[in-house]
Image: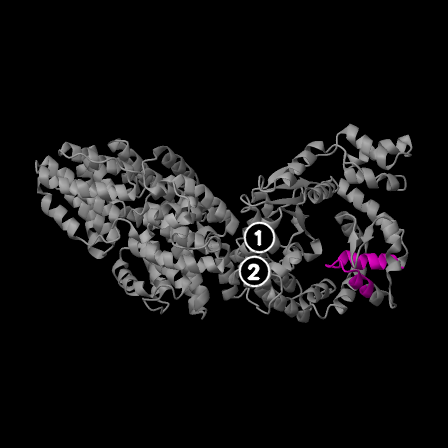
Amino acid sequence: MPLFGRDNELKDLSALVDGPGDLSGILIEGEPGIGKSALVEETVAAAAVAGVRVLRTAGIDAEHGFAYAGLQRLLYPLRREFDALPARQFEALSNALGMSDTTAEPSPHLVGLAALTLVADTAAERPLLIVAEDVHWFDPASAEVLAFVARRIDSEPVAVLATVRGGTNSSLRDAGLTAMRLSPLPDDDASALLDSTAPELPAPVRLRVLAEAHGNPLALTELPTAVADLAEPPPTLPLTERLERAFSARGAALPERTRWALLVAALDDSDSITETLTAAGILLGSEAGTEILAPAVAARLIDIGSGTVTFRHPLVRSAIAAAATAEERRRAHLALADLLSEAPDRQVWHRAAGTAGADEEVAGALEDAAERSRHHGGAIAALERAAALSATPGRRADRLLRAAELAVESGRRDTTERLVDAARTLPLTTEQEATATWLLSGFEDGMRESPSRIGELALLAASVATDGFPDAALRILWGAAARCFWSEPGPDTRRAVLAVADTFGIPDGDPRKLAIDSIVAPFERGEQVLGHLRALAATTGRDTEVDHFLSSAAYQVGAFDLAAHFAGAAAPGFRSAGQLGLLTRALAIQAWSLARLGDLAAAAPIAAEAAAFALETGQPFMHASVTAVQAEIAALRGDYTQAAALTADAERTGLAAGARPVLATVQLTRGLIALGEGRFDDAFTDLARIHDPRDPSHSPALRACFLTELAEAAVRAGQTDAVAELLRGLEPVAASTPSPALHIGMRYARAVLAGDAAADLFATALKADLTGWPAERGRLHLAYGEWLRRQRRVVESRTHLRTAREIFDALGFAAWSERARLELRSAGESSPNRDPDAREQLTPHELSIAQLAAQGLTNREIGQRLYLSHRTVSTHLHRIFPKLGISSRGDLAALLPAANETAG
């Protein structure tokens, strides 16, 4: 039958089939019966004609709690290709699909990478169309993986075609697919469709059907046979409900034995006809054959295939289930449970559905199923159902809070709040209340909460520790410490948090204690934190979580060289485990620190990757932080237009939440732009704001990290008295901590403010250990060279100015390079033009790929590192080679030295 009124949609879908890879895919949205499935079938038929391979899956409401059920249907035809996957991907995918004995939960992102590799390799032989219908019913794990794949197929001969019911949520909406929203058919097309399906319909009935259908193709097809027998439905009844009434009325007219078999099929989470007939036989007390379903086939409610029974539309399934009584549904579920002894996870869900009232045995079995679940989404659903069946309020609260904890780990705020609210309707123990409080504060480090909340959390942590629950107490205290980074609660609150931490009996060298101390008291505890960090610097790579804590501690105390070192050690562990949320944070610290050190070539691709992962993992404030770093990099390279745009983006998020570190980095970037453009008064104003406790960009720790820029702006703006007073206020801080960033800045500032007596201060500053701090060394040489020339010591000045020029050329600091050249010219020495570094000709994403290729990694290995398919890597390399004027990857190593070979 031709499709009426969908010519434009068919044209777009035909283009998708004709050129997979030109468009990532299409997401068809619309109400039930609007024609989504009909368009899919037309597209699948067109794909067959075009020689495009099709992989299909569909969401099923009854399978929503079974992790990776939708993915299993999609990839099952490719199961023989699994062995060709890299080992970690094979392990993750086979575990996710229940094909291994491993019980550990695989990372959804690692499963996604395996699925991406699999479909990309398949598409290398023949273009591929992935079809996913009813994705609103997908289990969360499958939906997450499909979205992951959809975001990464732009360079592959692969396209995704998905359907979703309008008004429902789906992760595919944010996966880069082109939305195709189906509207009701126009009147002319609706009339033509009705005439083609029911040409003999009497005129009065025809008018009524057209009015009731409102242009819905399914209604135009199904209502003609039902409308004459139905009483006039209330005008407020939704169309979906009217269709369900029509289907349920059709089902009610079937023989009793057929109705029971149809109910079993509607409640089964499988389309197996054997299961349907066996369970129906249990209910009826006698063996049931396929003939029992023949009346339902004749009534156009189901289709029977090779070993399968499928409903002609999802509304038919829901209508049949809704029409049954609660007792009938309970009996059908228990019949299904009786025959599923070999599938315990499916069995327990049917047992639970067939249980009325509390049943601790079934609740315990659901809890076991949650432990076995290969995805948090399935575990959360199992625990929530277990809570409903719990025999005591205490057990119910435990299960609700455990489900909420998994929801936090999955980044599902709404689910967490709903589960915690449900738990708080019950009488809670001290530990349970503490857990509930911690869980509600687990998102975005509590940035949207009042700073007064920090003191409350510290008191709660102390109380929980006193009650004998140290792990829960430490989690709460870590949440309090994190808030001290993003906001400023004041010295009294900081001291209170620190005092609680000191009562826990945690050794000072414990990474968790170092991280808490460094955030809450970066100067007061700086010396002991730095001592431990330097001792632990040679131990990286043993424990990813430890390295991450240490990177945070190093960042807080201004040891950016150590912060980059520890974060660089943590990132591979998070990457290989597929922990993209934590990987984002490690990359953010690494990028921020490298930018401060001056290694822009390394910082830029890391920041770009962190920004992409921050969006993908739903971390808006981490995205703002990394965007601010990207703005700083652009400013240092002299791209002030890009820097200003990125700064505005970061500031929007930072101001809305009062994220002080984001706003401090924004002000730093504005200061850098103003310095580069010669607006020295503006530069001083922008940078001085970071030191004003009344300003939203004031950050107690970061204010000590930008003194070089502030002092330079003050000297050029004639604000030496103001900055000298500010430095006097920092002298006690400098005396209490060996913070590298603080002392480097203080030495520079003292020198540039000393006037004619600066020689010894510059010499002292240059004698300090600046290994790993090339940008600061370059600034010192430039400032010293400028001072020497103004003292008429021209010959001496050239050595320092030449060194500064070479450093800034190597780092790509455009404005500073030009300043060094101008000073050298004034000192009587010309400079060669700076040749652009090869790395500056590539986008950050291309640079990531090129650097890994230069290290000798294969395309497949690069893809595993960056969560891309190896074919996408190959496509990027073919674009990179012409940009660099080379023809093979063998030339990359000479053009792109390793990250640690920057000027130092």
Residue type, label 1: Asp
Q: Quadrant of residue 379?
A: bottom right
Percent x, y for residue 528?
A: 26, 62
The local secondary structure at tag 1 comes to helix
Left of 884 or right of it: where is 88? right
Q: Majority secondary structure of the magenta segment?
A: helix
Percent x, y for residue 168?
A: 65, 45
Q: Which residues are magenta?
A: 257-279
Left of 414 or right of it: where is 233? right
Residue that appears at 68% across and 42% down: 50
Residue that appears at 79% across and 32% down: 190
Which colouring convention does the figure follow? one colour
**Count of numbered circles in the view:** 2
> Which residue is under mark 1?
121
What distance separates the C-alpha of mark 1 from that of mark 2? 10 Å
854 and 722: which is toward the camera? 854
Q: Is residue 890 magenta?
A: no
Left of 563 or right of it: where is 780? left
Number of other residues with Cα within 10 Å of mark 1, as a class: few under 14, some 14 to 19, many 20 or more: some
Give yes or no for contact between labels 1 and 2 (Cβ–Cβ under 8 Å). Answer: yes
Q: Quadrant of residue 81?
A: bottom right
The local secondary structure at tag 2 comes to helix
Q: Is residue 264 magenta?
A: yes
Specify whether residue 521 is in view.
Answer: no
> Which residue is under mark 2?
84
- Which badge, 1 or 2, is on the more N-terminal residue? 2
Residue that appears at 59% across and 67% down: 371
**Residue at the outermost front position:** 887
Residue type, label 2: Ala
Percent x, y for residue 370?
A: 61, 65
Number of other residues with Cα within 10 Å of mark 2, as a class: few under 14, some 14 to 19, many 20 or more: few
Left of 590 or right of it: where is 88? right
